[in-house]
Amino acid sequence: MDSGVIYLVGAGPGDPGLLTCRAVETLQQADAVLYDRLLDNRVLEHATKAELVFVGKRPDRHAVPQEEINALLIARARRGETVVRLKGGDPFVFGRGGEEALAARAAGLQCEIVPGITSAIAAPAYAGIPVTHRGLAPGVTIVTGHEDPAKPDSQVDWQRLAAGEETLVILMGMARLSAIAETLIAHGRAADTPVAVIENGTHPEQRSVVATLASIGARVQHAGLGSPAIVVVGKVAALAHELAWLPERPLAGRRVVVTRAQAHAGELARLLRNCGAYPIEVPVIETAPPEDPGALDAALSNLKGYDAVVFVSVNAVEACFERLRTVHRLDARALAGLELWALGSRTVEALKQRGIEADVNPRNHDLASLLEREPARAPSGRRYLLPRGAAWWGASRSLEIADALATHGARVEEVNAYRSVPVSGVRERLQRLLEEKRIDAITFTSSSAVRSFAAEFPAAELAELCSQSAIASIGPLTSATAREVGLPPRVEAAESTLSGLLEALIAHFAADGGGAGPGGAGAGDASDAGPSPAGTVTFNERDGA
Ligand code: SAH
């Protein structure tokens, strides 16, 4: 059998936008991906057909020994697999990528390197720090801070590094930050040399502190910054005051659970991310074909019997087209001659993708005014097909739009085109997340999501969840269900849209103490400049650099 290929791939520093095109290509081709802890797991979503193998450090256990990782890479490649060894940042910058490449070569295997954007340069850049700068820093040295600087046989020559004006970028240096700063001062770097520490660089939770060699240890401890972080020593660090560019984001560092079905979570996640939040997708429902597709099939094979079709959601569009294609062997032409309604911009878009411009596009709740404005639409006697979702927990009420049409004399036929079904395992996932870190809010965009979520937890745990995280609902119907099942919302959207939900979350956290942000960002401490949750850099005037 032909051997496979090993790719040593850099995953970039955290922001998935900083993944290279080549890295995405190799992930898409991979049969297996061996990865360590990543700042953002979205990177792994590109590996659609691969087996994902975690080889990093678990909270309670030691890291998988390097020899074992090498052996795993080699064994899989020998089996003919395309193996991606994914590493944070760049694989050759403190990634032990060199050792893995040597092992692959020794085994006679093909090994390709895909460089990544290293955190050593990207984290400073995201804090507004150029690591070299004319007149300030003629060069940069990237060095490990892992070793005890006081050790006489330390491989790092701190005495040499202390001399001159070059920027020092120190990785893995948080545990020994004070000792490193003291050593540099002892060997002659000025005590007032600017120093920046950037935690979780390029990630929504990025925080940074700028101080001096003399004060950085205390400042970082006070701010509670931890790993992973980059330490930048040198005059360039002070440029952060002028060049910090990450906008003040109203949800900076907030961890928000998105419970929407996987297929529809993307939009809310994107909105949250744009505001600086860290969305955590925990889908609690997914869509499935209806239990009995009989009514849908009957309607689809008798489309001539209707005057109009009302699509109330993207799901409805997808379900109808899927059924038309797979069962009836028909496409968009089957809808020719029918008046087509689409509720909401995403539904309009879903039709557009299938080559169809909706004839009628009422906003969700202004059907009555639409009918007044356009009396020609007065539907008396007309026949409307309304494909819709069936709730998994039992019979559902008639939809609002169906009632409105019926009031105007229309004959409306609601048929189940799909149904929402609960996803299991939500409780385990959420508990793991809560153990790892706090969760600021849990969002719900439908009653079915609320019910599915609540069904996973005993009542006492629901109450506990509500005390730890703000329950956020998209509107009054979802809120009512949430209250009913023991998840009283603290946040409710004024307008029942995703943007409305986002606005409500922003207002909630703004009222909630001015965005304390993650990890104890010094409340009541503004003058002494705690870390900056919004990615901007704080600076203590007394440091004087
Ligand atoms: N190969 C990686 C470095 C691995 S060593 C790269 O090129 O970026 C691990 C160290 O990298 C951490 O201790 C920390 O110092 C640094 N690091 C990695 N990602 C980081 C990030 N997003 N922000 C700050 N530091 C980071």
Image (cartoon, rainbow, N blue to C red):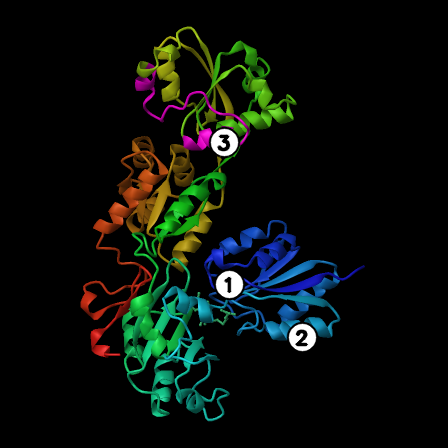
Three-letter residue code for mark 2: Leu
Residue at 76%, 62% in the rendered image:
3
The residue at which mark 2 appears reads as: 102
Decide if residue 72 is on the left or right side of residue 265. Answer: right
Disc 3/disc 1 C-alpha distance (Å): 33 Å
Instruction: Pinpoint residue 359: horizontal percent, then vertical percent.
Output: 45, 20
Which quadrant, please, contains the C terminus?
Answer: bottom left
Indicate yes or no whether the magenta region holds residue 309.
Answer: no
Q: Is residue 100 visible?
A: yes
Three-letter residue code for mark 1: Gly
Q: Say few, some or many: other residues with alpha carbon within 10 Å of mark 1 (under 14 / 14 to 19 / 20 or more).
A: many
Disc 3/disc 2 C-alpha distance (Å): 50 Å
The residue at which mark 1 appears reads as: 12
Q: Secondary structure at mark 3?
A: helix
Q: Which residues are magenta?
A: 345-371
The residue lying toward the viewer, choosing from 423 and 40, is: 40
- Compare marks 3 and 1 and give the one earlier in the sequence: 1
Quick check: is the Cβ at mark 3 less than 8 Å away from ligand 1?
no
Instruction: Pinpoint residue 214: horizontal percent, then vertical percent.
Output: 29, 83
Say if mark 3 contacts mark 2, CB within 8 Å. Answer: no
The residue at which mark 3 appears reads as: 350
Quadrant of the rendered structure where residue 172 is?
bottom left
Three-letter residue code for mark 3: Ala
Marking on residue 79: none
